[in-house]
Amino acid sequence: MIFQDKIIRLHELTRIVGLSSSTLWRREQEGTFPKRRQLGVRSVGWLASEINEWIENREIKKKPEVQK
């Protein structure tokens, strides 16, 4: 059996998305970020496909331009 989805652990996830673990937790609770998957008693991970989809569908907020 070949698995096509990768599990991303927290350390790698924070590096990929550029958000802190507390921000990720808060966004999960709000329903604006994919839910973590329980891998073991003390380990969690996220599906790479769900993270990629979140990145692709994310609206990027632009800073307002400063008028001179």
Image: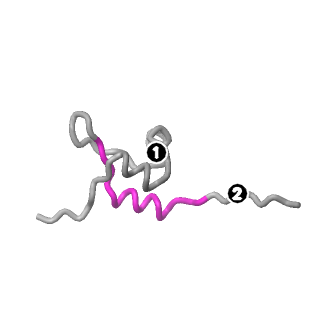
- 68 sits to left or right of 40: right
Q: Nearer the viewer, residue 33 or 66?
A: 66
Circle 2 crowding by C-alpha within 10 Å: few under 14, some 14–19, many from 20: few
Q: Amino acid at mark 1?
A: Gly
In the rendered image, the quadrant that contains the N terminus is bottom left
Magenta range: 44-60
Q: Residue at x 25, y 34 (%)?
A: 42
Mark nearest the camera among 1 and 2 is 2
* Structural distance between the alpha carbons of marks 1 and 2: 24 Å
Instruction: Say if the magenta span includes residue 58.
Output: yes
Q: Secondary structure at mark 2?
A: loop
Amino acid bearing label 2? Lys
Expressed as whole percent of the image width and height from the top left, the position of residue 66 reads 81, 58
Question: Residue 31 shows which numbered tag?
Answer: 1
Locate residue 33, reporting x and y percent.
45, 49
Residue matched to label 2 = 63
Residue drawn at x 22%, y 34% as measured from the top left: 41
Q: Give the color scheme: rainbow, by chain, secondary structure or one colour.
A: one colour
**Disc 1 crowd, CA 10 A, few/some/many (<14, 14-19, 20+):** few
